[in-house]
Image (cartoon, rainbow, N blue to C red):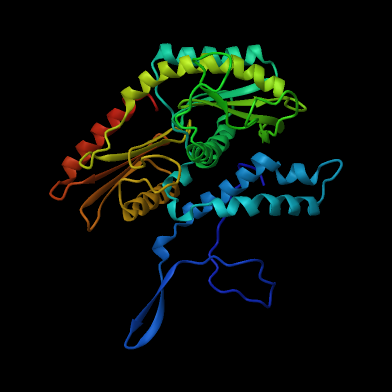
Amino acid sequence: MTSKSDVTLDHFYVFNGNYSKKEGDIIGVPYVVKNKDGIDYTEYQHDEVSSSVCQAILKQAYMRFRLFMGSFETILNDPQYGSVTLLKHKLDYFYTGYLPSLKLNHRDILDIFQGLQFLPLDKITFLKVQCFMNLIEATFPQIKYTAFLYNDQLVWSGLESEDMQVVYNYLISSLLPEYLEKEFHSGSMPRNSASPFTSSHYGKFVTGASSLNESIGITKSSKVFINYPNKPTSLYLVVYSALSATLCLFVDSTSLLIDYLKSLDAFLGPQLTTLVNTVAEQYSKHVPDVSDSAPKYLYFNRLNLAYKSTIHLDNRRCSNVLTTPEVLRIITDINSDSNRLKEDGETIIKTMSDYWVVGKLSNLREFYVVIQQKNANIIEIDGNVYFNYLQIISMKLT
């Protein structure tokens, strides 16, 4: 299986044991037991499950496995240990930890998009970030790629978009939430300067080393597999955080020593802390209106994978959404219909609860608007959609 292979999800309602043995547990369509005339019967809630979302989750599961374990092909073709037995062992090891972490009840259209939420910056601020990332790679030649995030929004990435898509999903849905929760419970938030180098140093390693106090030794860092379209490469993933900024460093090395991370910390901490203050000023200018009366929108660009949403308060699968499950299902259905048609068009739906849901597809860009106005007409709704689309254009995400 490659990243460009189609992953197909089929519905099976009846299992016939004459053909094969059942493997593992069965996850079925949710249902409720109702009673009519004194007789209990099962009513399956098919509308609660989206095949498109389930298919996206299935694809994510493989892409996450491939990121940390390598593709099926690379495992089977390992010159020393490649075998089906090794593949089964890796699958069991990885998914034993991965599957329980899935928050299936919080999955929606964002899983289908698997988009990258970019932070719009002015040219000067973006240039400062770009120069800083280039300086890191020039100062530390072992670092082959870098990425910069601020408040879960991507500012800069040297990776191919396909690789960054998988890494970004891992960061915002798994690594960073777990790290922040650990910091919170340990009393490290907000944290004071933890480095002896400077009083303006707020940097800390998320991966690589929990402490730099050790005098010598090899760090516990994970390797990731990237660059599949060309030649698969295995690199160490070192994640470094300062205040609300996150740096991803992809290091080419046989091992990562504490001394190497200490030199990284001394270089990154002070400069990153200063840079974050500049980025924070720009971030405050792009805080969306999330009031109850404001229309909610969702935008996705298939060309560069950029997305922007005021429907979701965050992208960490925590059910922080500003609309109803019914509206999210409608958006998913509009998306599925648009993919089948493969044409530009617009869909307008009004729900029984007086929500207007508008889906617009044009030039590989998808735009959805949710408006709750009981007495509005189609002309007013269409004008509202156009106004919100102009706001997206002004953010330079297109």
For residue 161, side relative to residue 317 (left or right): right
Compared to 385, does 256 lie above or below?
A: above
> Which residue sits at x=53%, y=65%?
11
Compared to 324, does 282 lie above or below?
A: above
Residue 117 x/y as whole percent: 44, 32
Residue 77 x/y as whole percent: 81, 43
Residue 124 x/y as whole percent: 42, 11
Quarter of the figure with residue 307: top left
Q: Please identify the residue farthest to the bottom as the structure is shown.
A: 38
Q: Of residues 305 and 41, which is closer to you in this image? A: 41
For residue 272, side relative to residue 213 (left or right): left
Residue 35 x/y as whole percent: 35, 82
> Which residue sits at x=76%, y=44%?
75
Quarter of the image for the C terminus: give it.
top left
Q: Of residues 54 and 128, which is closer to you in this image? A: 128
Quarter of the figure with residue 135: top right
Q: Please identify the residue farthest to the left as the structure is shown.
A: 375
Compared to 322, does 232 lie above or below?
A: above
> Which residue sits at x=35%, y=51%?
328
